[in-house]
Amino acid sequence: MKKITLIALAFLALNLNAQQMDTLYSNQIYIDVNSNLFIDTILNFDSISKNDLINSFENWASTTYRDYEKVRVAKTDNLVSLAFVQDMQYAKMDVKFKDGKLKIQIFDDGNVYEPATSYRAAKQSRSFYLKQYFNIQGDGEKIIYKNKKAMFNTKFSAVLSLKEYKEKYESLIQGISNSIKKETSKKESSW
C-alpha cells in the first residue's frame, strides 16, 4: 500500500509540475500599451552634430531598407519617421535628433493585409495589434500560458512571437548605434 501511495504522490507531483503556468505582462513587451509603444530609448554620441547624426541615420536606413524613400514617411529638421513591415506587422519608428543624441521610438502599427483562404476570412490591414493577445484582468493585462512547446499551445506561440518582436526591435536599435559609431570613426580616421 505504501508503494502505491508513493507512486501516486510522485505521479501527482510530476503532473502538477507539467501544469505549471507562467505569466507574461503587457508591460514586459510594451512601454505604453495605449499608444502601442514598444521601444523608447535615447542613444548618446559624444561630439556628433545633429546634422551628422541625421546623415548617419539615413545612411543606415538606406542600406537597411531596399526602398528608403518609400519607408520614410516624414522628415523635418529634427525628426525622421519610418514605416516598415516586421514579420507581417507594420511598425512605425520615430527618430528625433539633437546634437550628440537621438531618441528612437518604435510603435506597433497593426497587421498587414492577409487575403482570404478557404480556412479564414481576409484580415484587413491595421485591424489587429499585438497587444490584443493580452487578456485584461484585475491586476493588469497579461497572458497566462503553459511554458512548453505543444502543437496547439497558441498562447505559448503568441508569447514567443511577442518576445521575438521585442528582441528584434532591440537588435535594430543596436544596429543603428553600431552603424553611427562605425561611420563616425571612419570620418575621424580619414584625417
Image (cartoon, rainbow, N blue to C red):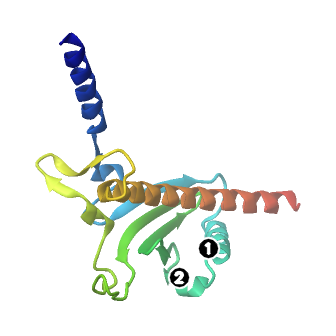
x%, y% of residue 87?
Answer: 47, 71
- In this image, 152 relative to 44: left or right? left
Question: Could you say which is closer to the camera, residue 21 or residue 99?
Answer: 21
Residue that badge 1 annotates: 61
Question: Could you say which is closer to the camera, residue 73 or residue 65?
Answer: 65
Amino acid type for the residue under numbered disc 1:
Ala
Q: Are marks 1 and 2 in contact (CB under 8 Å)?
A: yes
x%, y% of residue 166?
Answer: 44, 57
Q: Which mark is residue 71?
A: 2
x%, y% of residue 9?
Answer: 22, 21
Residue 174 occupies quadrant: bottom right
One can see residue 30 in this view = no
- In this image, 4 relative to 58: left or right? left
The residue most toward the left is: 138
Instruction: Give the mark nearer the N terminus: 1 vs 2.
Output: 1
Element type at marker 1?
A: helix
Residue 130 occupies quadrant: bottom left
x%, y% of residue 5?
Answer: 19, 17
- Quadrant position of the N terminus in the picture: top left
- In this image, 53 relative to 168: left or right? right
Inter-mark Cα distance, 1 to 2: 9 Å
One can see residue 115 in this view = yes
Which residue is found at the position 62% from the left and 60% from the top? 175
Amino acid type for the residue under numbered disc 2:
Val
Element type at marker 2?
A: helix
Q: Give above or below for 41 relative to 21.
A: below
Q: Give above or below for 7 relative to 82.
A: above
Question: Could you say which is closer to the camera, residue 13 or residue 127?
Answer: 13
Within 10 Å of disc 1 (Cα), the crowding (few <14, some 14-19, many 20+) is some
Q: Give above or below for 181 relative to 89.
A: above
The residue most toward the front is: 1
Which residue is found at the position 27% from the left and 60% from the top? 33
